[in-house]
Each structure stands twice: as C-alpha cells, then as structure tokens.
Amino acid sequence: MTPFSLAFIAHEVHRRGGMERAAAEVLSRIARQIPVTVIARVCDLGAVPVKWIPIHGPSRPSVVRTWAFARAARVAERRAGCTISNSIGAAALDADVITAQFCHAAFTARFGGIRGGAGIRAAYQRMAQAHFVSEERRAYGASRLKRVIAVSHGTARELREFYDVPDEKIVVIPNGVDPAVFRPAADAATKRALRLHLGLPPDDFLCLFVGGDWERKGVRDAIAAVAGLTDTRFVILGRGNREGMQAYAAQLGASRQVVFPGPSIAPQEFYAACDVFVFPSRYEAFSLVTLEAAASGLPIVAHSINGTEELVRDGVNGWLVPVSVAALREKIEQLRDDRELRSRLSRGAVESSLRYNWERIAAEQFAVFESAAAEQQSSPRRQLTGNA
C-alpha cells in the first residue's frame, strides 16, 4: 500500500445523529491506518488520533451556513495538504471522494423539498432545497471527482438519474452498525428492568421511533397508527416538534400512548427495551436507525425506501408496507398479538444486521480511498481551484 493521507470534510462528526455517527464510526477505524485531518464545525471523536481543523461561521440560516462552510473548508483543505479529500455530500465545494448520505434533487423531485410547514416556512424550504441541489450538482460534476460512495443502491440510482454521475465512479457501500453496542436484551427480566430504568411502561407493547425531522419521517402517521390500540405505547426518541406532535396525539385521544423521552446519549437502551421499530419515513439514503433496530432484535415496520428496501424482508425481519396509516396499524397489531411471530422476526432482524458490521464497512471505504489516492498520486499534482 502506498502511504497517503485523508482530509475528511463534514459539518459535524460525532456519535450522535445519523450521518455524523456514520462518519465517526468509519473514521475511528480508518485513522488506525492513515493520517486523517477532519475539517468540520464540530468534531468529537474522543481518543481517535485525528487532526481537527475547526470551521467557524454562521449557524443559520442553513443556506448561509452551508455556503460559508464550503468556502472556509476549501481554505482549510489547502492548509491541510492531504493526498485526497472525502466530503459528506456537498459539504465541500468539490472533493476526490464524496459519500452520498442524501440526494437533495431526488427529495425535491418527489416531495418538493418540504419537510413540514406552510406559508413562509414552506417558501424558505423550497428556496433552501434549490440551493442544496445546486451545490450538489456542482460537487458531483467537478472534474476532480474520482469516486462516489453511495450508501444504498437506491441512492446510486438517484445519483445517476439526477446528477449524471457515471456508473464507473459509483461504489455502493452501506452504512453499518456495531453489534457490541446494539443488541437485544438478554431476556424478558432484563428488558423489564431496562424499561423501569428508562421510565417506560413495564408491561405494555412498545413501538419505537428514533430520529429527527419528524414530518418527513412520518411520525404523524405512526401516532395515528398506534392511537386507540390497547396496551400499546409509541416511544419517540430524538429531537423534533414535540409540541406539534403532542397536540396531534391529543386530537386523536392518544396523549397517554405517546412518550417523548427526548434525545439520548444511549439509544441502544431504548432499542433493547422496546418491541417493534416503526419507521414510516418517506425518504432516506440508508437510515442508520433501521440497522440499529435490526441489530437490537426489533422487527421493522417501514415503507419501501432507499436502504430499508435492501434490509427488510417481509415476514423475515419485518414488513415493508404501503404509505398508509391502516397498513402500519395492521402490522403493529399483528406483532402485538403474536408473541411467537415477534420472536421469529426478532431473530431474523439480528441475522439480517450481521453483514453491516462497521469493521467491514470501514474496510470497504478504505479501499475506495486507497484507490482514489493511487489515482491522484499517479497524475500531476492538481491545484485546488475555485473561490475561497
């Protein structure tokens, strides 16, 4: 292997959230092999041996934040002097390798770029999405680009469809999960004790959702699906419009059924404490939480979207259902009432998660970086272009 160094560019890198945690998991393994410089607003990797160049700038509005970050990151990348760079989406103006954790053009084409809201809020979201699409189009069209890591086959299709990224540049490498952290409760007594520790009802059937951006991810549909079901609660873990969802649950007479623990630094405890993972998101690249749910032994009830369609097999580890409250409700009731089915799908979920181990995922990404570095080192040194 020819020695090389990597500049990694992302807005945030830490073990919270989705793409932020995915980045942290990969970098914590790659940094054992090569020098890594992280260019980010936030970098929290503990004792992982990386160099961090912090990027300072406005935190809002989002279009200003991303515009300012990309240009400051360009200056930082020049200063870092690494062999190649890897950007999460269009965090950088351009990069040698881009990891596609979202496709704004696909989201805009299908949903208008709206994540919930109306009036001025919706108008701003449309404007912001147009900006994000433009930034992605520039990054994916850069002459410098050597490889794109798509986290699902669906995302790869979107990159070809909306940004004309050539097949030969795309490598599909999914997100991963750590089975040492995310795993089922050892037995029923352990699960009950965990529920008491977390302040959850010890005897009810518990549905779980994990994440933010609640409107896009269908939390309203999940609340409606659970409303009125006997001995059934819905645990919404994460940060979102809590007041709006509480009001919606109250309209449906389901206030007592919906639990809002807020964000958690130990989401694995909630996975292990619950019975089923309900994830009616309309769009993802490959959601990390579905992998964590599977590794934790939770049957998954979700829609057929990027990533999830590759993970979930009907009747094996969960179900892919139509976009319908009734369809969600039917499967939730079926799992609530059939303990044997729940146990079988739980085993299937764990089994399906095994191929997504982070060690394997990081090794596959490292091979992409190594290939891009070899290509870079075999050609004349390219000078970074563009406005700082």
Image: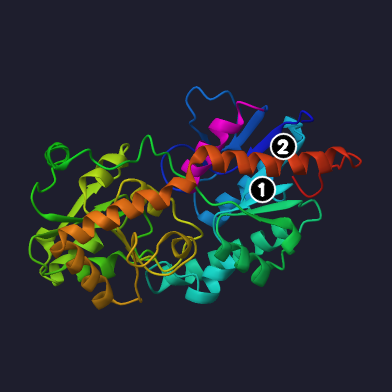
The residue under the point 77% across, 39% down is 373
Disc 1: CA contacts within 10 A as few (<14), some (14-19) or many (>=20): many
Disc 2: CA contacts within 10 A as few (<14), some (14-19) or many (>=20): many
The residue under the point 54% across, 45% down is 58
Is residue 208 visible in this depiction of the protein? no
Depth order, front residue of 228/109: 228
Depth order, front residue of 158/272: 272
Q: Is residue 31 magenta?
A: yes
The picture places residue 191, in percent across and down from the top left corner, at 17, 41
Amino acid type of the residue that numbered disc 1 sits on in the rendered structure: Ala
Per the rendering, the mark at residue 77 is: 2
Q: Is residue 320 left or right of residue 110?
A: left
Assign the magenta stretch its main secondary structure. Answer: helix
Q: Secondary structure at mark 2?
A: helix
Q: Secondary structure at mark 1?
A: loop
Stretch in magenta? 19-33
Q: Which residue is mark 1?
A: 92
Per the rendering, the mark at residue 194 is: none
Q: Is residue 100 left or right of residue 59?
A: right
The residue under the point 36% across, 36% down is 181
Mark 2 vs 1: CB contact within 8 A = yes
